[in-house]
Image (cartoon, grey):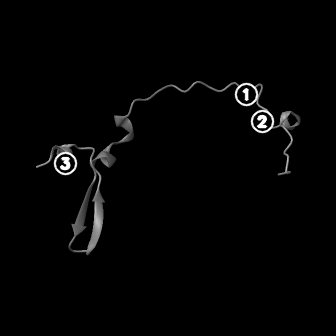
């Protein structure tokens, strides 16, 4: 058998004879949220954000000319 088929990350197309349709078998979809590394997300400094409420005057004007 080919080595690329033995990898658990390769998807496979199979025919479901009972439902008479093609289905994709994807072993990598079996991963659960706890299987992934959790990283800390630092809060964003929004003190200079022109898109925040009350700072609309800092947003650049929209030019509709082409």
In three-dimensional space, the C-alpha distance between marks 1 and 3, rounded to whole angstroms, equals 48 Å
SS of the residue under disc 1: loop
SS of the residue under disc 2: loop
Dividing the picture into quadrants, the one containing residue 56 is: top right
Q: Which of the marked residues, 2 or 3, is nearer the chain's N terminus? A: 3
Residue that sits furthest to the front in the current view = 66
In three-dimensional space, the C-alpha distance between marks 2 and 1, rounded to whole angstroms, equals 8 Å
Dividing the picture into quadrants, the one containing residue 23 is: bottom left
Between circles 1 and 3, the one closer to the viewer is 3
Q: Does the residue at mark 1 contact the one at mark 3 (Cβ under 8 Å)?
A: no
Residue with the mark numbered 3:
5
Q: Position of residue 58 (x, y in %)?
A: 85, 33
Is 56 located above or below residue 12 in the figure?
Answer: above
Residue with the mark numbered 1:
46
Is 60 located above or below residue 18 in the figure?
Answer: above
Q: Residues within 10 Å of mark 2 (few under 14, many from 20)?
A: few
SS of the residue under disc 3: helix
Q: Does the residue at mark 2 contact the one at mark 1 (Cβ under 8 Å)?
A: yes
Residue with the mark numbered 2:
52
Q: Which of the marked residues, 1 or 3, is nearer the chain's N terminus? A: 3
Residue that sits furthest to the left in the current view = 1
Q: Is residue 23 left or right of residue 43?
A: left
Q: Position of residue 2 (x, y in %)?
A: 14, 47
Q: Residues within 10 Å of mark 1 (few under 14, many from 20)?
A: few
Point 23% across, 69% down: residue: 16
Between circles 2 and 3, the one closer to the viewer is 3
Q: Is residue 59 left or right of residue 43?
A: right
Point 73% across, 28% down: residue: 46
Q: Position of residue 65 (x, y in %)?
A: 86, 51
Dividing the picture into quadrants, the one containing residue 62 is: top right
Point 39% across, 39% down: residue: 33
């Amino acid at each position: 058998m080919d080595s690329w088929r033995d990898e658990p990350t390769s998807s496979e197309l199979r025919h479901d004879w009972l439902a008479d349709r093609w289905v994709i078998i994807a072993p990598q979809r079996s991963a659960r949220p706890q299987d992934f590394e959790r990283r800390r997300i630092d809060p964003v400094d929004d003190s200079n954000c022109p898109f925040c409420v009350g700072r609309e005057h800092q947003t650049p004007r929209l030019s509709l000319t082409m």
